[in-house]
Image (cartoon, helix red, strand yellow):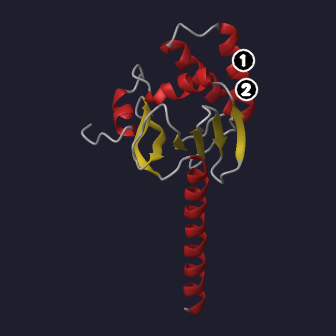
């Protein structure tokens, strides 16, 4: 019984350390970071990921630092995730040149790893409009220092012309969906 109690205590300490690491990384880029909203992205009937947004004091504004965290429910190749992101950007905007889309896809393909059920990826928009990508252990995977990329990339989920308006509302904290 004593061993079980020690194991439970050890597990709680590890879980709390993960939570504090989570908050400390977010707060290093997003002052007063709090959860804004969350929702599921589905393709047909399959849950692909759960998305969650974090912003200062829980108020999401696209011109201030924020984070978008995706917890995947499926196994996907990083290259396929990058390709799909660029397809979504292409569908939402005819203002981006094919050369720039190709460059962004190349950069994303190098940053985004393969994911499996339970994998977490977090994108953070910084004060400088740089996009940082972290894995579930808060290891920096890479960065793209391009304001136009940041606007279009996060616009996939948060832009006014997002293809999933229900998820967009949830990510902005609108619980009336």
Quadrant into which the C terminus falls: top left
Residue 115, quarter of picture:
top right
Kindly check if marks 2 and 1 are in contact, taking CB atoms under 8 A apart as contact. Answer: yes
Is 49 rendered above or below residue 159?
below
Judging depth in this view, the residue of 64 and 138 nearest the camera is: 64
Residue on which disc 1 sits:
103
The 10 Å Cα crowd at callout 2, few under 14, some 14 to 19, many 20 or more, is some
Mark 2 vs mark 1, CA separation in Å = 6 Å
Judging depth in this view, the residue of 84 and 22 nearest the camera is: 22
**176 left or right of 98?**
left
Image spot of residue 75 (x, y percent): 60, 40
Q: Which residue is found at the position 70% from the left and 35% from the top?
A: 143
Image spot of residue 146 (x, y percent): 66, 24
**66 left or right of 160?**
right
Image spot of residue 57 (x, y percent): 41, 50
Q: Residue furthest bottom?
A: 2
Judging depth in this view, the residue of 3 and 133 nearest the camera is: 133
Judging depth in this view, the residue of 125 and 43 nearest the camera is: 125
Residue on which disc 2 sits:
107
**43 left or right of 149?**
left
Q: Which residue is found at the position 53% from the left and 7% from the top?
A: 94
Q: Which residue is found at the position 47% from the left and 41% from the top?
A: 51
Quadrant into which the N terminus falls: bottom right
């Amino acid at each position: 019984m004593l061993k079980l109690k020690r194991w439970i205590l050890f597990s709680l300490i590890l879980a709390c350390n993960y939570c504090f690491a989570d908050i400390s990384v977010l707060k290093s880029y997003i002052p007063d970071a709090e959860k804004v909203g969350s929702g599921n992205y589905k393709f047909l009937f399959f849950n692909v990921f759960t998305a969650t947004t974090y912003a200062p004091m829980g108020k999401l504004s696209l011109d201030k630092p924020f984070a978008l965290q995706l917890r995947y429910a499926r196994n996907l190749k990083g290259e396929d995730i990058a390709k799909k992101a660029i397809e979504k950007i292409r569908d939402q905007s005819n203002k981006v040149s094919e050369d720039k889309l190709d460059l962004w896809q190349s950069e994303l393909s190098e940053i985004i790893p393969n994911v499996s059920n339970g994998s977490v990826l977090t994108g953070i928009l910084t004060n400088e409009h740089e996009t940082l990508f972290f894995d579930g252990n808060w290891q920096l995977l890479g960065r793209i220092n391009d304001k136009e990329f940041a606007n279009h990339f996060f616009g996939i989920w948060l832009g006014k012309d997002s293809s999933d308006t229900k998820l967009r509302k949830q990510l902005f904290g609108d619980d009336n969906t």
